[in-house]
Amino acid sequence: MSGRGRLALCAFAATLLAAGSMLPLVDPAAWIVQAAFLLAIQSGVGALARRVPLPRLLIVTVQFLVTLVLLTVVFARGQALIGFLPGPEAVQRLADLLTAGADDVGRYAIPAPATDGIRLMLVGGVLLIGLAVDTLAVTFRSAAPAGLPLLALYSVAAGLSGGAGRLWFLLAAAGYLLLLLAEGRDRISQWGRVFGGTGRSPNGLAAGLDMSGGRPLAPVRTGRRIGALALGIALAVPTSALNGGWLAGTGTGSGKGGGGGTISAVNPLVSLQNDLNQPENREVMSYRTNSGSPQDFYLRILALDQFTGGEWRPSRRSLQDVPKRLPNPDGLAADVAVTEIRSNISASRSYQQTYLPLPYPATEIKIGGHWRYERAGRTLVGDRGQTTRGAQYEVSSLVVQPTADQLAAAGPASAAMRREYTQVPGSLPKVVKETAEQVTKGAANNYERAVKLQNFFALDGRFSYDTSVTSGTGSAAIGRFLKAKRGFCVHFSFTMAAMARTLGIPARVAVGFTPGTAQSDGSVSVGLRDAHAWPELYFEGIGWTRFEPTPTRGSTPEYTLPDAPTGGSANPSRPQASTSAAPSAAPSASDSCPPQLRRQGECGSSTAPGAATPKDPGTPVGTVVWAVLAVLLVLALLLLPLLWRVRVRTRRLNSPAGRTPADATARTLAAWREITDTAWDHGIGPDDSLTPRKAAARMVRLGRLDTDEAAAVHGVAGAVEQVLYAPQPRAATGLSEDVETVRNGLRASADRFARIRAVVAPRSAVRVIWAASESWSALIGRWAARWRRLPPWPSRQRG
């Protein structure tokens, strides 16, 4: 195969392998087949244009025009001229699809549905990257810079999916190394034949039987080793550094019994807007609870308590083992009515979250797995890869029932509390504080200020709930939200928390889920569209208290409703959580039980509701079938070298003896090829610079063969010299037995790993790739020859 043909094939493979990193972004992934087919046409056009030959810039232009035609045929055929030419309407159609695709990317979570716009972005992106790689590596014969577009393709996938995974990195890097190897081989081969490499004869002959050259050279072999070493380091170093290695001190702790540790959280708001805009409200968990106030049963994931000006994010805090019973909530006084409830929660297998959703404030959690406890936020964080996937757990939590009088009479928070939770960045627009002061004008205390802020967003300020508004959590986003008065829970909660901080009220933002939808069987289903964010404000004597500024979402807390009585419900239609609703039985001797519960006799374990079974149907059958087929395909690909080797060995050793000298020659050479490949499989590469006799001696020395095995090798080598050079060659007998003797000897002298590799991944299987390369080169050559035989275009001459 010619150098450029090999480079073109490698450029195609490298682009396709790098494009594989984008498979997790879209479901279904059938677009990759379409992209591969169009990419093959694009590469073939480039190969034909270089065969003509055409100037380099003209080759690139032709490929680009063909790419545009292909995209027009696939995505805008109805608007194209005569069905395939990209006219103005077709170009407008492609532009509209790109715009729609960009909107879909912002609307859907990963994996996104394969809409026409998203498919155009994926397929068109792969074709453009493929054109860039083919232009650099093949047309301009500079493979090294071609790594930049490949890196860009992989980086986009890694950035959107939060890390494309080791497998995709390995495939993309292997494609790039394959491209560099092909270019290096092509450059070295231009200097003529160089000895010292592994034989690459098409018919498998070694020991000087084939003088056609064109085999991997020693520098190329060294380059392969360097590339493999570099790829291994690129995979091993980040793994060791991040998982218990050099950077382990910044992780999430050492798990149960490890003590200490810190939490460096990822902001969960990245996917909140995508969850709200999902076309299907897929269930993420279900629960059963004996709460008397189901409308207030918010499932809280974590709290964002740092406002940097660019974003709200969770603080980095120390972790500890999960205590049997969690400490009392911060700031909760003994005179505030509370009720302890129990809930059973089941997360679906499609929901994977590092933080465990819990009602606030939880007091006791029974769950298996590896979890750590963060005290300030009262959250549980998965350790050692633990997630919520399929988790089932039982939670005891408190329903805190403060009265409006208690909230109004709350004293000032501690200096440490105010110092940490009232900080606002200098970049916060002045309009935020000015609006807060204007809205809360006339309020006598922090409670009245908080209620006025809530009502300003939910009722009085004429704000609209809109999930299509661009998300943002920084100072600029808050300023835009106050001006536009359109947004979703992120904007409402962050803006109210920021306003409260400007008024000196400690505030933070909680992220989690609203109560969900009650089901006929008594359970409650929580879906993706129940994802929510709400502000929590701190009142001394009550603790962190939920508010709900987002209109049409969640439920307004009873203690913020107008004229709320001290112990009753202002809304008769809503069931109220009271102490009588607690299903308590026996008192508990736990020292951490709040004193007001101890007085009421509610510290004991109450009857927990039955576990709720998630209604998430799990992984669709079609997905399972495709996954099984993919696994079988991967296994088949991995076993191809083994199967090919067994087939070749059987054909060589069982070939008919024949009656003519040509048949005897073919049988002898087949036996020698089998011995050469067997030695190659065990690490003894063939050397074309040696005669059969010297090659046999080398095989005996390197393979540490004993007397009988050495005699078998030399016997077959002598038979080869007879059929090649003797005027009347003697007929050789027992060739199959000699081959089997040599094979057993090589296996006996090799270590276990070498024996396993010789069977599972035989080195001689590379001949399959060489055969495919030669077939591709022959095909390209035939098409080029037909192209040259076409009659020339008639010239226009004036007579």
Image (cartoon, helix red, strand yellow):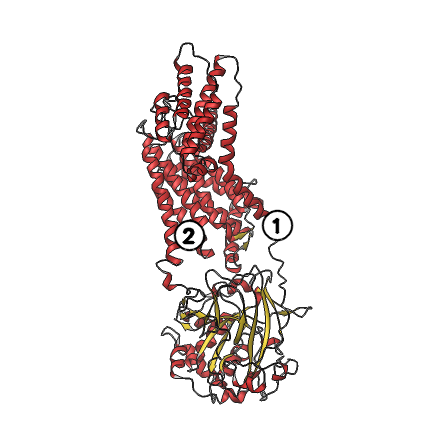
Q: Earlier in the sequence, mark 2 or mark 1?
A: 2
What residue lies at 45% left-to-right and 29% top-to-bottom? 743
What residue lies at 56% left-to-right and 44% top-to-bottom? 77
Mark number displayed over residue 622: 1
Q: Amino acid at mark 1?
A: Gly
Residue 116 vs 574, above or below: the answer is: above
Classify residue 707 as left or right of residue 408.
Answer: left
* Place of residue 213 in the rendered image (x, y in percent of width and height, measured from the top left): 36, 26
In front: label 2 or label 1: 1
Whether residue 86 is visible: no
What residue lies at 42% left-to-right and 79% top-to-bottom? 501
Which quadrant is home to the C terminus?
top left
Q: Amino acid at mark 2?
A: Ser
Classify residue 587 as left or right of residue 535.
Answer: right
- Outermost residue, top direction? 728
**Helix, strand or loop at disc 1?**
helix
